[in-house]
């Protein structure tokens, strides 16, 4: 037993000695690397600096080229925007001129067929097939008729033609709008919803008108009673 214990201790000692030698070798290798890094020859250091300078110059050149390309793209975009504005201006003028021709065309349509043509145009502008026109669809319809309303003008338009105040224009309201544009309806006869409501409040109801005798009728009845 004593011999076995001594053998075990001997093996453990050998293992510890081997591990110590391995750690020492690794530490010596790391120290040698640090020493080599700390003592780079001047020629090698100059070569490294030259490479870094070359890479930095190449990077600056690349950045300069990209900036030049970006400036060229910006210049072309400005030119395209200017051309687009000119094109849009020409398109608006063309639509305005065409709208007058469209008005003349509608004026020569018999009244019985006018609603049919207006309904066809309404279906053309009703992109989502909802049966009504929203604000964007109304703007498109007005553009075809040569009008480019501002937001305030569009609010006024809806105040006149959108009788149920649902911010949608139905076919009947669109028909009235087109007829007003064609001057088949006097613009002075158009009133906003608020104006119509105010006017209806100031006038007596229909049954009150029927119940209240007129002044001339009262005078006639009085004179007939005297004669009798």
Image: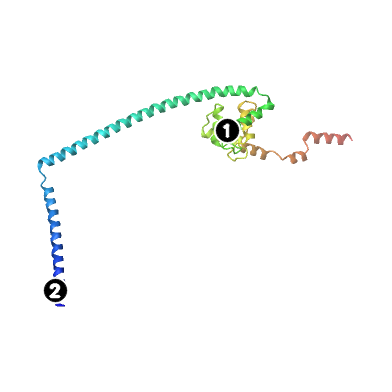
Name the quadrant containing residue 182. Answer: top right
Farthest-out residue, bottom: 1
Residue 101: quarter of image: top right
Tag 2 and tag 1, C-beta contact below 8 Å: no
- State left or right for residue 211 relative to residue 124: right
Q: Which residue occupies 64% across, 37% down?
A: 196
Q: CA distance from mark 2 to mark 1?
A: 104 Å
Q: Which mark is residue 125?
A: 1
Residue 114 rendering spot, x and y as whole percentages:
66, 27
User: Marks 2 and 1: which is nearer the front?
Assistant: 2
Q: Secondary structure at mark 1?
A: helix
Q: Seen in the image, is 69 located left or right of residue 129?
A: left
Q: Nearer the viewer, residue 108 or 159?
A: 108
The residue at 42%/25% (across/down) is 83
Q: Is residue 41 above or below residue 75?
A: below
- Image quadrant holding the N terminus, namely bottom left
Horizontal side of residue 90 vs 126, given as left or right: left
Figure quadrant of residue 26: bottom left
Give the x, y percent position of residue 210. 77, 39
Return the mark for residue 174: none
Q: In front: 44, or 100? A: 44
Task: Relative to 146, say whether 217 is above or below.
Answer: below
Of helix, strand and loop, which one carries label 2? Answer: helix
Residue position marked by numbered label 2 in the rendering: 6
Upstream in sequence: badge 2 or badge 1: 2
Q: Position of residue 63 (x, y in %)?
A: 27, 34
Question: Which quadrant is home to the C terminus?
Answer: top right
């Amino acid at each position: 037993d004593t011999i076995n214990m001594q053998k075990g201790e001997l093996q453990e000692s050998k293992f510890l000695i081997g591990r110590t030698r391995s750690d020492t070798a690794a530490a010596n290798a790391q120290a040698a690397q640090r020493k080599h890094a700390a003592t780079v020859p001047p020629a090698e250091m100059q070569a490294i600096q030259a490479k870094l300078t070359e890479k930095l110059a190449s990077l600056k050149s690349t950045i300069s080229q990209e900036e030049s390309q970006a400036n060229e793209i910006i210049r072309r975009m400005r030119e395209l925007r200017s051309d687009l504005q000119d094109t849009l201006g020409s398109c608006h003028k063309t639509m305005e001129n065409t709208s007058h021709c469209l008005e003349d065309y509608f004026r020569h349509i018999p009244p019985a067929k006018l609603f049919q043509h207006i309904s066809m145009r309404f279906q053309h502008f009703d992109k989502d097939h909802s049966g009504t026109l929203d604000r964007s669809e109304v703007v498109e319809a007005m553009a075809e008729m040569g009008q480019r309303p501002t937001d305030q003008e569009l609010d006024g338009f809806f105040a006149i033609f959108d009788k149920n105040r649902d911010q949608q224009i139905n076919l009947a309201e669109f028909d009235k709008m087109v007829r007003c544009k064609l001057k088949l309806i006097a613009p002075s006869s158009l009133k906003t919803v608020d104006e119509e409501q105010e006017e209806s409040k100031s006038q007596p109801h229909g049954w009150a008108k029927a119940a209240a005798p007129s002044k001339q009728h009262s005078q006639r009845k009085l004179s007939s009673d005297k004669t009798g």
